[in-house]
Amino acid sequence: MTTAPQLTLAEVEAIAREAHANQTDKAGRPYAEHLAAVADGVRKRGGSDEQIAAAWLHDAVEDDALTRQWLDGAALPQSVKDMVLAVTKRDGESLPSYTARILATPGALLVKESDLAHNADPARLAVLEPATRTRLTAKYAQVRGLLGLTDGS
């Protein structure tokens, strides 16, 4: 039995960009900019190719850009799938449960750290309505605390 070749990072990036092509972030920017920033953040933090692939896909299932079935069947290492699912927030899930899953999944913490760093970027937050900015700043700080990320990176 032969196994299908694994998707390359370039292929994962292309899939993620296409899947999120019609989405924008809270500031109205193309969502792919966020994905690229998170992947670059993982790379700069010394992440593996598998972590970079997970960064490209980190919001795909949560945002309904790709289905769970697609992820399950994708030609990706199981570790990539595990990281994507670890950082995928589930409806009604508490933050302690969510962050515990991230901490329990090898490699997922670095992906979430990079995601939080980009989400909390003052330049990104500055363009939001003050109430939204305040709410998100508090939420990101709470998640960082639950994950043990206290250096503000």
Image (tube, helix red, strand yellow):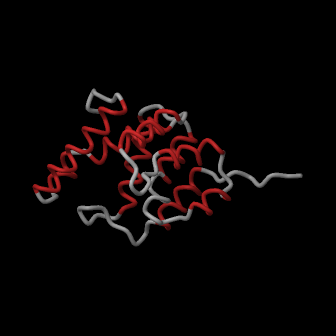
Q: What residue do we see at 40% from left, 72% from top?
A: 22
Name the residue at the right extreme.
Answer: 1
Name the residue at the bottom extreme.
Answer: 22
Give the left or right position of residue 150, taking residue 32 as reference.
left
Give the left or right position of residue 94, taking residue 133 as reference.
right
Q: Position of residue 145 (x, y in %)?
A: 29, 32
Q: Position of residue 30 (x, y in %)?
A: 34, 65
Q: What residue do we see at 46% from left, 46% from top?
A: 87
Q: Position of residue 112 (x, y in %)?
A: 41, 41
The C terminus lies in quadrant = top left
- Which residue is more in the foreground, 62 or 110? 62
- Which residue is more in the foreground, 89 or 125? 89
Q: Quadrant of residue 147?
A: top left
Vertical comparison of 1 with 116: above or below? below
> Tag count in the figure?
0
Q: What residue do we see at 43% from left, 69% from top?
A: 21
Q: Position of residue 126 (x, y in %)?
A: 14, 52
Give the left or right position of residue 57, taking residue 149 as reference.
right
Give the left or right position of residue 23, taking residue 125 as reference.
right
